[in-house]
């Protein structure tokens, strides 16, 4: 089936063709018709398989048709996402697909001035894509009215329903009409969240396009056993051996992110740090520079592990293993998007063996190990351009030499 065969408005179909969307992906094929038919949907499909358009196309179509007929103002669709970067990205997808319609989509997030946002809201919008924090601020200030919502979409739904956000979501549900469509999309769903999700969308159509292993088929992923202190030399090696590659490197904490960037700088590798401790404007600018290719090495925390769609990322490096196994799937999923193929390589030090075990239990498969001889391992350390490391090594060698001399 092609998009041209769907019963969706011509304005949307034409624009899909402009964007190069001819055939629906699996998840789009399975979800779009149900959403057009007015049903609730809970959809689980691997990273990079086109979940955004799977909910954006039918919600846009319904709103576009109603708007052409009744010209009703007010927010009709609320899309909630966990990060500001995602709010920006997904609102852009809506704006692109809806370019030939008169449906207005707005991406709202914290960390930037409210005034301009309030102005845009006052001018009237139809679709609001937002992070919970800023939305609640503006609801309490009376700048947002969600009482006319017909569609509630949770993207990265498992995370949205997890810990911190659950209360926010139930609060939202209390304020919007009973008669509405609820749509949940994610690449992962844990058992705990599944039962909660089933409570929230009782009669939802459940679509799960995840084979047993939730890591997308387009990604080859492997583990490299490496000492904690040697990780930076291995990262240096990977980057220098693959100078053309666009790479996302995930590190456990903000402080460690900055340290890895500094370590790369010492060996003359240009990279940029992205984490929640930076100003929002700077966060967007860093992501833009990575998207455009001006910077090819992005070193980041889990703030960038979900949803970010940059199709030409060649490789993901898990410099540290993630604390929760779902995030392994999401981090790897920043590469191998759509029809592209990608690689993920994860450093695992001895202290991270338990995390690795949990990841393998979750993905249901033993992950391939890089076969590296001790000689090859040492060669990688010796190859570093880090002067301070060589200097320490020289002292160590000198000491050993001195010792031998003593023995002589
Ligand atoms: P997911 O949310 O499942 O991780 P996205 O919605 O971010 O994936 O989409 C991944 C990529 O696939 C995007 O770059 C998007 O433009 C592209 N894409 C989505 N649907 C189609 C389609 N039907 N045809 C071609 N490309 C598509
Ligand atoms: Mg997504």
Image (cartoon, rainbow, N blue to C red):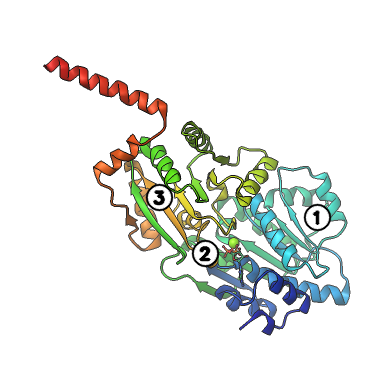
Place of residue 255 in the rendered image (x, y in percent of width and height, measured from the top left)? 52, 34
- Contact (Cβ within 8 Å) of mark 2 with mark 3: no
**x 67%, y 44%: residue:** 285
Quadrant that contains the C terminus: top left
Q: Which residue is mark 3?
A: 346
Q: Nearer the viewer, residue 402 or 147?
A: 402
Query: Furthest-left residue in view?
Result: 408
Q: Nearer the viewer, residue 208 or 269?
A: 269
Label 1 Cα crowd, 10 Å radius (few <14 / some 14-19 / many 20+):
some
Res 55 quadrant in image: bottom right
Disc on res. 281: none
Q: Quadrant of ligand 2?
A: bottom right
Q: Is residue 180 visible?
A: no
Q: Nearer the viewer, residue 214 or 263?
A: 263
Q: Which residue is mark 1?
A: 144
Q: Secondary structure at mark 1?
A: loop
What is the distance, in whole Å, between disc 2 and disc 3 at their CAs?
A: 20 Å
Res 145 quadrant in image: bottom right
Q: Earlier in the sequence, mark 3 or mark 1?
A: 1
Place of residue 153 in the rendered image (x, y in percent of width and height, measured from the top left)? 66, 65
Q: Earlier in the sequence, mark 1 or mark 2?
A: 1
Q: Earlier in the sequence, mark 2 or mark 3?
A: 2
Q: Is residue 349 visible?
A: yes
């Amino acid at each position: 089936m092609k998009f041209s065969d769907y019963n969706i408005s011509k304005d949307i179909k034409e624009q899909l063709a402009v964007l190069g969307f001819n055939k629906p992906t699996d998840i789009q094929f399975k979800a779009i018709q149900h959403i057009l038919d007015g049903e609730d949907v809970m959809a689980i499909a691997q990273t990079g398989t086109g979940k955004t358009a799977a909910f954006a196309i039918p919600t846009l179509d319904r709103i576009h048709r109603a708007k052409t007929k009744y010209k009703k103002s007010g927010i009709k669709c609320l899309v909630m996402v966990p990060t500001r970067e995602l709010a920006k990205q997904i609102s852009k997808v809506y704006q692109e697909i809806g370019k030939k319609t008169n449906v207005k989509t707005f991406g709202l997030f914290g960390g930037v001035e409210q005034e301009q946002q309030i102005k845009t809201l006052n001018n009237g919008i139809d679709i609001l894509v937002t992070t919970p924090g800023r939305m609640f601020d503006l609801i309490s200030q009376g700048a947002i009215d969600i009482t006319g919502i017909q569609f509630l979409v949770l993207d990265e739904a498992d995370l949205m329903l997890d810990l911190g956000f659950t209360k926010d979501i139930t609060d939202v549900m209390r304020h919007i009409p009973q008669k509405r469509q609820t749509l949940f999309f994610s690449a992962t769903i844990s058992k705990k969240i599944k039962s909660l999700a089933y409570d929230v969308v009782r009669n939802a159509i459940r679509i799960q396009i995840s084979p047993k292993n939730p890591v997308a088929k387009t990604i080859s992923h492997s583990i490299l056993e490496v000492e904690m202190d040697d990780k930076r030399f291995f990262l240096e090696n990977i980057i220098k051996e693959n100078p053309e590659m666009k790479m996302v490197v995930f590190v456990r904490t903000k402080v460690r992110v900055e340290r890895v960037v500094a370590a790369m700088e010492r060996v003359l590798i240009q990279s940029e740090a992205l984490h929640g401790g930076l100003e929002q404007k700077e966060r967007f600018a860093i992501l833009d520079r990575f998207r455009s290719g001006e910077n090819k090495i992005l070193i980041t925390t889990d703030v960038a592990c979900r949803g970010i769609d940059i199709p030409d990322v060649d490789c993901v490096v898990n410099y540290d293993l993630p604390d929760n196994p779902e995030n392994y799937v999401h981090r790897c999923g920043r590469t191998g998007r759509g029809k592209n193929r990608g690689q993920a390589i994860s450093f695992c030090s001895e202290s991270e063996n338990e995390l690795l075990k949990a990841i393998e239990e979750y993905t249901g498969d033993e992950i391939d190990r890089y076969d590296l001889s001790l000689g090859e391992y040492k060669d990688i350390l010796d190859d570093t351009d880090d002067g301070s490391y060589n200097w320490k090594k020289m002292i160590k060698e000198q000491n050993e030499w001195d010792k031998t001399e003593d023995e002589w």
